[in-house]
Image: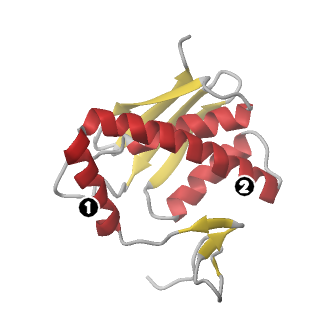
């Protein structure tokens, strides 16, 4: 399984910090991330943690999509698809866009091989992804707070998770 990284990684020789396309990155083992994830979830509860992650993930997706659009000259649907492709190549899961309509603020995303599904200590906790998908959708439309996302199906034979992005009810 030896191969070159599927995303460009630059390492600053002076600081040792990593970046991709000018954005700082951190590389950590999955067990490190999941141990932290479970500890916070255990301390404050799944519902509260999911709310916090939604907000943080939304902002992070918006920022990343904006930066990548500028760096690569991407617009509209290409930004959204690029975002999910890069997330897939960074080991979070395999994300597949089944449907994408930015005009109607609708998308369906299939998730396979999530790091959360690999965590034998708990059920798949893919709720982290909901804010990411909503933030990416809003960024490609240029309007904050219009989209929302929810997981519509958990693990099945077809996919580990299925997520729907839709217009937020005002």
Measured as percent of width and height from the top left, residue 99 is found at: 58, 34
Q: Residue furthest right?
A: 73
The residue lying furthest to the left in this view is 121
Q: Residues within 10 Å of mark 1 (few under 14, many from 20)?
A: few
Horizontal side, residue 138 vs residue 89: left or right: right
Disc 2 residue crowd, few under 14, some 14–19, many 20+, Cα 10 Å: some
> At 65% across and 89% down in the image, what residue appears?
13
Residue sitting at the far top: 170
What coloring was used for the rendering?
A: secondary structure
Looking at the picture, does residue 87 appear above or below residue 12?
above
Choose between 135 and 13: the one closer to the eye: 13
Where is residue 149 drawn, in percent x and y? Answer: 48, 30
Comparing 88 with 146, the one in front is 146
Q: Kindly state the secondary structure of the residue where label 2 is placed.
A: helix
* Mark whose residue sits in front, 2 or 1: 1
Residue 68 - label:
2
Q: From the viewer's perspective, is 148 left or right of 119?
A: right
* Quadrant of res 32: bottom left
Q: From the viewer's perspective, is residue 151 above or below residue 29?
A: above
Q: Position of residue 1 (x, y in %)?
A: 43, 82
Image disc number at residue 35: 1
Q: Front-most of 125 and 48?
A: 48
Quadrant holding the C terminus: top right
Evaluate whether residue 123 shows in this view.
Answer: no
Question: How far across and down, in percent of the image, does residue 23 sit?
Answer: 66, 64
Task: Assign a secondary structure to mark 1.
Answer: helix
Q: Is residue 140 left or right of residue 43?
A: right
Q: Quadrant of residue 93?
A: bottom left
Q: Which residue occupies 24% across, 58% down?
A: 119
Task: Report how far apart the C-alphas of labels 2 and 1 lie in the structure.
Answer: 30 Å
Work out whether residue 6 can be spotted: yes
């Amino acid at each position: 399984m030896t191969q070159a990284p599927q995303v460009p990684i630059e390492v600053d020789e002076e600081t040792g910090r990593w970046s991709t396309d000018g954005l700082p990155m951190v590389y950590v083992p999955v067990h490190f991330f999941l141990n932290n994830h479970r500890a916070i979830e255990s301390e404050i509860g799944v519902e509260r943690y999911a709310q916090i992650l939604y907000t943080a993930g939304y902002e992070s997706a918006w920022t990343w999509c904006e930066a990548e659009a500028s760096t690569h000259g991407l617009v509209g649907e290409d930004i959204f698809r690029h975002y999910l492709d890069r997330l897939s190549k960074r080991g979070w899961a395999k994300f597949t866009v089944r449907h994408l309509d930015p005009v109607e603020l609708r998308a369906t995303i299939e998730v396979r091989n999530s790091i959360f599904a690999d965590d034998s200590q708990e059920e798949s906790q893919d709720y982290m992804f909901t804010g990411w998908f909503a933030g990416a959708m809003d960024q490609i439309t240029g309007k904050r707070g219009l989209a929302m996302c929810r997981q519509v199906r958990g693990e099945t034979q077809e996919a580990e998770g299925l997520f729907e992005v839709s217009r937020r009810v005002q």
